Image (tube, helix red, strand yellow):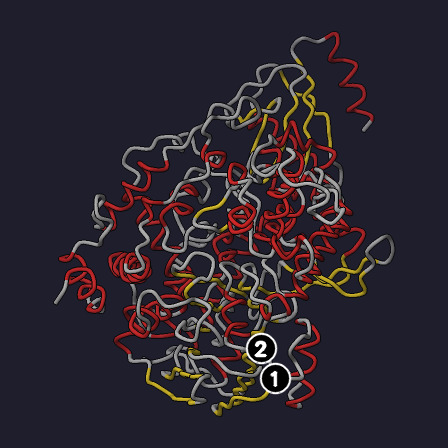
Amino acid sequence: MKGGYTGKMLFVNLTSGSIEEKELTDDVASKFIGGYGIGAKVLYEMMKPGVDPLGPDNVIGFITGPLNGTGAFIGGRYIVVCKSPVNGGWNDANSGGFFGPELKKAGYDAVFVSGASDKPVYIWINDGKAEIRDASKLWGKDTVETLEALIEETGERRLRASLIGPAGERLSMMAAVMNEEHRAAGRGGPGAVMGSKKLKAVAVRGTMEVPVADPEKLREANRAIREAAQNGPMAPVIKAFGQLGTGMGTGASALSGDTPVKNWGGVGVVDFGEEKAHKLDAAVMDQKYRTKKYACANCIIGCGADYEVKEGKWPLKKTFRPEYETAGSFGTMLLNDNAESIIKCNDICNRYGLDTISTGCTIAWATECYENGLITKEETGGIELTWGNADAIVDMCQAIADDKGFGKILALGSAAAAAKLGKGAEYLVTVRGIELPMHDPKLAPGYARTYYTDPTPGRHVKGGTQTNQARRPDKYVYEGTGDKDLKMTSGNEILQLAGLCLMSAFTGMRDMAVQLMEPVTGMKIDEAQQIAILKRTMGIRHAFNLREGLNPFDIKMPKRAVGEPPQAEGPLKGVTVDYKLLAENFFEAMEWDVETGKPKKESLEALGGMEAVIRDLYGK
Amino acid sequence: MVSDVLNYFKSFADTSRMQISAKLFSMFRHYAGVDQVTIDLESGATVTDLLDALAGRFNNPAFKNDETQLMLMINNENAPLQTVLKEGDVVHLLPILGGG
């Protein structure tokens, strides 16, 4: 490949202590691009079905995209893949910050870790040299302390690290992989997989130049992105995101019906209301707490911010602005309008390494159970889990982080907690054990298809027709959606595989990933190739689940999320989403058999690179 | 502001005009610097006319451009841009999706 890749992947086995470099071939790179595409190809071929997600045979990968480290705007995201301990299926989660570009500059496109260590370790990669180091002194430290300790031990002030906090060490099913104090590859329990391997961190420092196929054309592409962001029709939105962050619309979106309310059982305009919505508006919170702007690598939007809470119950010297998903999970989902409690919960999750969506939504589930008498004050250790009780929310979040008292049960996540307690299943809003994120499919039905059938189910970043769908008059027409879904999802897939942030879509610039991929890698990717890439990278993730016995059509969609029964009032009243038809349409467009769930053999053969999948699904 | 007040009182005698209350959230509140505004419009005006008026009032294209992720509710129900407004309507300006 002319650029974008180092062509090298690192394989570390923590049981044997072996470290091996392998080539990332041009063939694999061009067919699977990067991120979870390459991750799925590697894990599918390395792992056998049925392995314990928290055992040594699970493999966790930290994978860059080809745009990482090249200077391509908004191209700083990397992806963590593994078999999920939550549901035994495929898992990928992505994160921004600076880790991905730094790993690339340190000489590797990806690091895959198998086996398990007897004692805590970390992997140190410094300009092409990798070693396994003792992490006994790091074990027990929170994410901020761990980063500081790594810097002190290595003497590399500018290192970046992908690491876990105490939640991952304790194998919480909600444990995230964190980087730079507040960036999280959060979902599906990847932090617990690191913890099970006694892997505290992957720390990297790189000063090598990442090759770029055509630097001048990359500069031109970057100029076009900047022009779209600053002067295009979406400029006001991009500017607002840069100033206010993703949380700019949390309260407002509760009113529109986008952000779920009261564990998905409420109606925003009725149960949350305008006054509370205003309190969660980032424009309001920023006036009081914002100290500094934060931007990930090569990002011209910069949607993050440092916060400081000077007084009150939960003062914090340096913390970070809660993202939209966090403000929804700890705010609207709990009828909580206390901004400082949300900032505190965000801080707890960041420091202990917890996924804010699952943690907040698990507390919302427990609160509904408590309000309905299924969980008692005795069980919670005196914490009164009533709607909007900010003190109780912070106390329970801390209990989950500390893995103490009732928090020990909730640290399992809501679905596993319900199973352990033997009650509360009727209030779960989960897909295959994962709490749904903060976008209601009744407003944008495309989410129902991705929550239901993406091989990484229950996520809001997996393509689909939902982009700009909320206001479209035809959004509740469920027939004939397959081709559009296929096209839009393929665009999203290439974006994520390339290492772009999903926020890049808000620039309104079409096919940004493709326009950057050509100058960076030399690869021209047309629409047909994009769809072929999707069929490979989604198909291999899907096949990973199928060989584990997991078929998306076996998933029971949470009824509240799809309007069964429909809401009686508010902007989404009367809406029921035909998610099954949306899924069938998509399966047909993907050339997946609707009855068996299998990708069709002739389609797999035509794609290339899917030999292992064909062997598993159809024999030799 | 004086003209707003005059228009408001004139509207009681003038059935060719109407007063529409616009509630601003998220980036709309950020750009306007206020969370609510009353706009005087001709009877029969649509939501698009309201947005044009807001764009003029606050001198910001965020209110006018169709591509700015705008979500509208009229009296707490979703509404398209073509909706004809009537006296006393309350219009919420919201982002089309929260992000992140």
Give the alpha-carbon distance from disc 2 to disc 1, as whole Å. Answer: 7 Å
The answer to whether A50 is drawn above or below residue B16 in the figure is below
Q: Amino acid at mark 1?
A: Ala
Q: Quadrant of the C terminus of chain A?
A: bottom left
Q: Amino acid at mark 2?
A: Lys
Under circle 1, the secondary element is loop
Image quadrant in which you'd find residue B20? top right
Q: Chain of mark 1?
A: A
Location of mark 2 (residue): A200
The percent position of residue A90, horizontal first and vertical second, equals 38, 61
The percent position of residue A268, horizontal first and vertical second, equals 62, 32
Location of mark 1 (residue): A135
In percent of the image, x 52 and y 43: which residue is there? A439
The answer to whether A334 is drawn above or below residue A239 in the figure is above
Image quadrant in which you'd find residue A243? bottom right
Q: Quadrant of the N terminus of chain A?
A: bottom left
Under circle 2, the secondary element is strand
Q: Earlier in the sequence, mark 2 or mark 1?
A: 1
Taking the image as drawn, is residue A240 in sight?
Answer: no
The answer to whether marks 2 and 1 sit on the same chain is: yes
Task: Give the class, few, some or many, for how many residues have Cα within 10 Å of label 1's Cα (few <14, many ≥20).
Answer: some
Which of A147 and A279 lies nearest the eye of the viewer?
A147
Image quadrant in which you'd find residue A495? bottom left
Q: Chain of mark 2?
A: A
Is A377 on the left-hand or right-hand side of A528? right
In percent of the image, x 59 and y 47: which residue is there? A361
Which of A572 and A177 lies nearest the eye of the viewer?
A177
Please report contact status of discs 2 and 1: CB closer than 8 Å, yes or no.
yes
In percent of the image, x 59 and y 71: which residue is there? A169
Which of A362 and A250 lies nearest the eye of the viewer?
A362
Is B70 on the left-hand or right-hand side of A139? left
Task: Give the class, few, some or many, for how many residues have Cα within 10 Å of label 2's Cα (few <14, many ≥20).
Answer: many
